[in-house]
Image: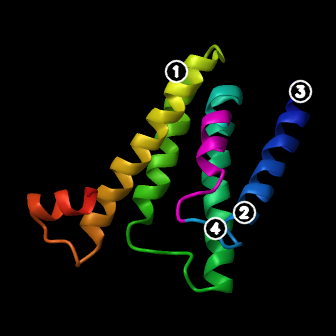
Amino acid sequence: MSNTQKILLSVSLILIAASTRLFEHTDNFTPIMAIALFGGATLKKGWGILVPLAVMFVSDICLEIIKGTGFYPDQVFVYGSFLLVAFLSGRINKTLKPVKMLGTALGASAIFFIVTNFGAWLANPAYAKNIGGLIECYI
């Protein structure tokens, strides 16, 4: 794949994925994690990490303008989980074999859950800042 094709693919993914967050959807059910996995595994390091973060940033700006919900206290944990998945998938998925891809996808979902729920526990005053509150957050 040429550099021009990679750039066009990356920009297309950013715009398409960003638009999916603007419409009604089940919470945390958008293609952004898949893009982080795909980008990390197939694009060069910089692009693989940049694409999912750009999707989130572009869509968060749009959500802030349209609904006033684009920015939130635990946002750094959401971005961090996508960053971590894109980075790890670049290391793990050197060969695109189905079993490896499935394992990486399940691992990405677990990383997102663990990291973002921890961020919610830290940022949300509804959770007690003790082990019981952390457990409640994960449940």
Q: Is residue 127 magenta?
A: no
Q: Secondary structure at mark 4?
A: loop
Mark 3–mark 4 distance (CA, rounded to whole Å): 34 Å
Does 88 sit above or below residue 114? above
Give the SS element for disc 3: loop
**How many residues crowd around disc 1 within 10 Å: few (fewer than 14), some, or many (20 or more)?**
some
Task: Give how far across and how far down residue 2 sits, in percent.
Answer: 89, 26
- Disc 1: which residue: 92
**In the image, what residue type sits under mark 2?**
Thr
Q: Which residue is mark 3?
A: 2
Q: Secondary structure at mark 2?
A: helix
Identity of the amino acid at label 1?
Ile
> Circle 4 sits on which residue?
25
| Chain-order first, disc 1 or disc 3 | 3
Image point 25% across, 65% down: which residue?
122
Cα gap from disc 2 to disc 3, whole angstroms: 27 Å
Mark 1 vs 2, N-terminal side:
2
- Mark 2 / mark 3, whichever is N-terminal: 3
CA separation in Å, label 1 and label 4: 30 Å
Q: CA distance from mark 4 to mark 2?
A: 8 Å
Mark before the other along the chain sequence, 4 or 2 = 2
Q: Nearer the viewer, mark 1 or mark 3?
A: 1
Query: Quick one: label 1 or label 4, which is nearer the N terminus?
Result: 4
